[in-house]
Amino acid sequence: MTATVPRPPSARPTLSALRDRAMRLAELVTTPLLPADYLDMVNPLRAGADLRGRVVAVHRETRDAATLVIRPGADWQRHVPGQWVRIGVDVDGVRMWRAYSLTSHLDRPDGCISITVKAIPGGKVSNHLVHRTQPGTLVHLDQATGEFVLPAHAPAKVLFVTAGSGITPVMGILRNHDELADVVVVHSAPTPEDVVFGADLRELAAAGRIRLVEQHTDSAGMLDAAAIAALVPDLAERATWACGPVGMLEALEEHWSAAGIADRLFTERFRPTVVVAGEGGTVTFTKGGTSIEADGATPILDAAEEAGVLMPSGCRMGICYGCVLPLREGAVRDLRNGEVTTAAPGDGVLIQTCISAAAGACDIDH
Amino acid sequence: MTVLQKKADNPIEHLTSEDIELIGKELDDIRQSVIDTRGESDARYIRKVIDVHRKIELGSRAVLLASGFPPAWVVGTIGLSVAKILENMEIGHNILHGQWDWMRDPKIHSTTWEWDMASPAEQWKHSHNELHHTYTNVVGKDNDLGYGIMRVDEDQPWQPFHLGQPIWSFINACFFEYGIAAYDLELGGVIARKQTGDPEFRARAKAVLRKIGAQVRKDYLIHPLLSGPNFLSTLAANFTANLVRNLWSNSVILCGHFPEGVETFEKKSIDGETRGEWYLRQMLGSANISGSKAMHIMTGNLSHQIEHHLFPDLPSNRYAEIAPKIRDLFDRYGLNYHTAPLPQQVGSAWHKIIRLSLPNGWLDATNRKNLPSQLVKLYKATTGDRRTRRRLQAEWTAAAAAA
């Protein structure tokens, strides 16, 4: 509600400059609120608003995956197939942000985008999105980003190696690059029913657009890099994009390096956002550049001051919120009740340093 | 009233230190029970209140564009007063306490919120959240006790200028937001110490002036200008709404810590204070207002001042739910849960302001018959030297004890 909340960059600079001037004038009447606070009540998706989207449909893909069709706000900039978007949803009243690959056609007539989410066990956000999100829900968005995209001149021969939800950025690419003539997709999932976009992939294969190798790991086990190489004999001639669990990607990178074709492999890592909380950890203050070792029983505020970091502070008992700082990444434990708060990169969860102890490595924006 | 530690019948004498820690433990559990169930419906509540406030404010200001038409003036002024009260109490005060920080919504957060108030959020948070809530009712540490301009305790020696206390308390109530801003700036102390040249103070003062400028420009220039020929009537409406809001919030705040029977504490009593003892001080140093749900919302749930002081960062909509548990705790430990309807609490607070504006015992020692002679003595105490005052004080103390 204040000017401290960053605005998304606009696609149309002159128009937005004019709009900004009008807004500043209107602010004379709305202060201490911003005109945007009132406009948001009417049209949260308008140009100039913080970037948001409205869920217009939820399509079930498998028993634990769903595609959410989202109408993005007016300032949404076209994404490049293969990129991901950060989406903020309120789960039990708490705003949480996660990144998901965009899987939509770029030229949908309705201008909507879609993301495809696989619910991971214990995943608060993914389960909420897959199982409990209703059309009409307002979500918060960032502009799309990511390097897992095809180059300007698509290579003649392409290989995609994916596992689980790793298929999602690849589907985003396949749906938007009809010109790819020679495509092999090697995809692993526990069972045929678990293959996200199973029907679409099989249809593409039947139409001759791709050669599809489905590996059902529950019955057939995991594929290793050598097995993939055996399945795709002309692997060295192909540009390869791989997306899946870290273990799989590392094995592939090793194999491709050994074969001297590391430059032909592009990978996308989805870091798991489940932070394992422990006792104490290294606390890094990213602006000041100081790192300290904090134990699991000492408030971060005390530990930091001990190490000579100038910290904002107040009541030192958890009531005044004078000491809050953004936790960029990591986990902290509330010393009053043992509750653990975790933050994934970009979350910027604000924590009270006077009653929070490190529960793992922490990056604090200060 | 006198600080709890000097009282003849100390209301916590019967509690052992184990009792106090047990009270603390129970309160921790109550707090946890709310945190464990904090969720979507709470988030919906605050968003709803914010939405309602914005609609009332916008609607009232629109109606006031026609403020030359008397019914429009009345409706608009009432609406704007309600909106301003909601904005300061249930929304601003509570968001700035961090009650809604758990939602991680950058637009409803203690670090980004700004309110319709002369004091900038940042400065208010320091003096209110940090000083008042930590040092609640500790004489000499909690400046909210009389805002540094009032005699709030019998132990403070009476001075003739205290006679004016009811008048300046009322003026302070009318322009409460400016009083708060001056108080957050520690203006009195800074002037007394001749530190007005301090660059840090100057920066803060500038922020206050900028804030006041924006508020004044909106209420007394832009909005009246937009009303065209109704310039003056809109200006009057906005002034009235600010006055109503100031009187209301001042009354609510007086009710929180000022009614008779609310305890105050000695400075040295909080040395090495445990969490249980801190809780106990909050319990005895706050007073509630009983009333309807609408009353609770309009006071920003500060009608649950006791619950608020125990748990300043729990969402305000949950105080009503835990109030019976807190009351039960008071009962079981033989403590006085101070609650009464608004008129009674306001009356009690003003009675105390008036009583303390007079020398100790004067009011008790005065009746209809001796009023003239008492007034003469009061005149003598006011105009006389310190010795006269001491002699008369002794006389009044004795008479009050006898009465």
Image: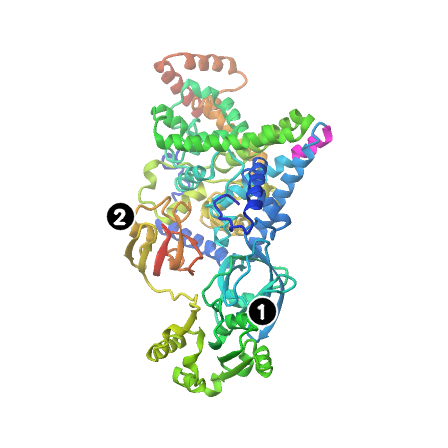
Instruction: Give the residue displayed 45% in from the left and 25% down from the top.
Output: B356
**Viewer-nearest residue: A240 or A141:** A240
Name the disc covering residue A67, or none.
1
Q: Is residue B373 visible?
A: yes
Tell me the magenta residue range. Answer: B69-78
Calculate the distance from the C-alpha at mark 1 to the C-alpha at mark 2.
49 Å
Residue A202 is situated, as x and y percent measured from the top left of the image, at: 58, 81
**Three-letter code for the amino acid on which mark 1 is drawn:** Thr
What is the chain identity of the residue bearing mark 1? A
- Magenta segment main secondary structure: helix
Residue B208 is situated, as x and y percent measured from the top left of the image, at: 46, 32
Instruction: Give the residue displayed 51% in from the left and 83% down from the top.
Output: A214
Residue A52 drawn in magenta: no
Callout 1: helix, strand or loop? Answer: strand
Q: Is residue B334 visible?
A: no
Q: Foreground mark, 1 or 2?
A: 1
**Three-letter code for the amino acid on which mark 2 is drawn:** Gly
**Viewer-nearest residue: A42 or A303:** A42
Name the disc covering residue A308, or none.
2
Residue B91 is situated, as x and y percent measured from the top left of the image, at: 55, 43
For residue A151, above or below residue B69: below
